[in-house]
């Protein structure tokens, strides 16, 4: 499967520092093996939005960009399953071992289910 065939529009992304800070300070945190997920509610209660953060300790720029693409694609494929009004920030941890999209989806959906972010 090729990544980047369909992109997330501006309405699906957390873009400003203010949005990230709001999720970090007012939201809840769930930690997994390869990622940490912060989540909160959006002020406008629209469709779910995603922000991705990653440390330079994860690897070279190529590796960091690949992990970010995998996280965004896992979100895009499962966006319809998430509660409306959710703002999510995914922090990819150093030592992340995702080899493919399936690993990213497994971690992402596992944390979302743990936090009750999936619609019934």
Image (spheres, helix red, strand yellow):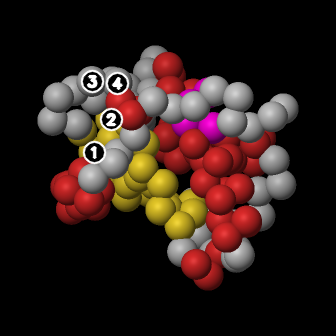
**Of the two numbered discs 2 and 3 in the rendering, the one whose residue sits closer to the viewer:** 3
Q: Give the numbered dot on residue 40.
A: 1
Quadrant containing the N terminus is top right
For the residues labelled 3 and 4, the Cα–Cα distance comes to 4 Å
Residue under label 2: 86
Q: Which residues are magenta?
A: 73-77
Find disc 4 in the rendering and name its residue.
47
Q: Percent position (x, y) of residue 36?
A: 49, 61
For discs 1 and 3, the disc positioned in front in the rendered view: 3
Mark 3, residue position: 46
Q: Secondary structure at mark 3?
A: loop
Q: Is residue 88 visible?
A: no
Q: Are marks 3 and 4 in contact (CB under 8 Å)?
A: yes
Please tell me which of labels 1 and 4 falls first in the chain: 1
Mark nearer the N terminus (2 vs 3): 3
65 vs 8, left or right, is right
Q: Name the side, left or right, on which 34 lies relative to 53.
A: right
Residue 57 figure quarter: bottom right
Residue 89 rendering spot, x and y as whole percentages: 41, 52
In the rendered structure, which disc, 2 or 1, sits on the residue that comes first in sequence?
Answer: 1
What whole-number distance in Å separates the C-alpha atoms at marks 1 and 3?
A: 12 Å
């Amino acid at each position: 499967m090729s990544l980047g065939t369909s992109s997330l529009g501006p309405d699906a992304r957390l873009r400003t520092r203010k949005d990230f800070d709001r999720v970090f300070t007012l939201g809840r945190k769930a930690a997994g093996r390869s990622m940490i997920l912060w989540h909160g509610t959006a002020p406008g209660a629209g469709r779910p939005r995603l922000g991705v953060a990653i440390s330079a300790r994860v690897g070279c720029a190529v590796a960091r960009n690949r992990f970010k693409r995998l996280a965004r694609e896992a979100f895009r494929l499962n966006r319809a399953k998430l509660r409306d009004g959710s703002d999510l920030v995914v922090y990819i941890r150093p030592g992340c071992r995702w080899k493919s999209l399936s690993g990213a989806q497994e971690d992402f959906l596992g944390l979302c289910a743990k936090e009750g972010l999936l619609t019934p």
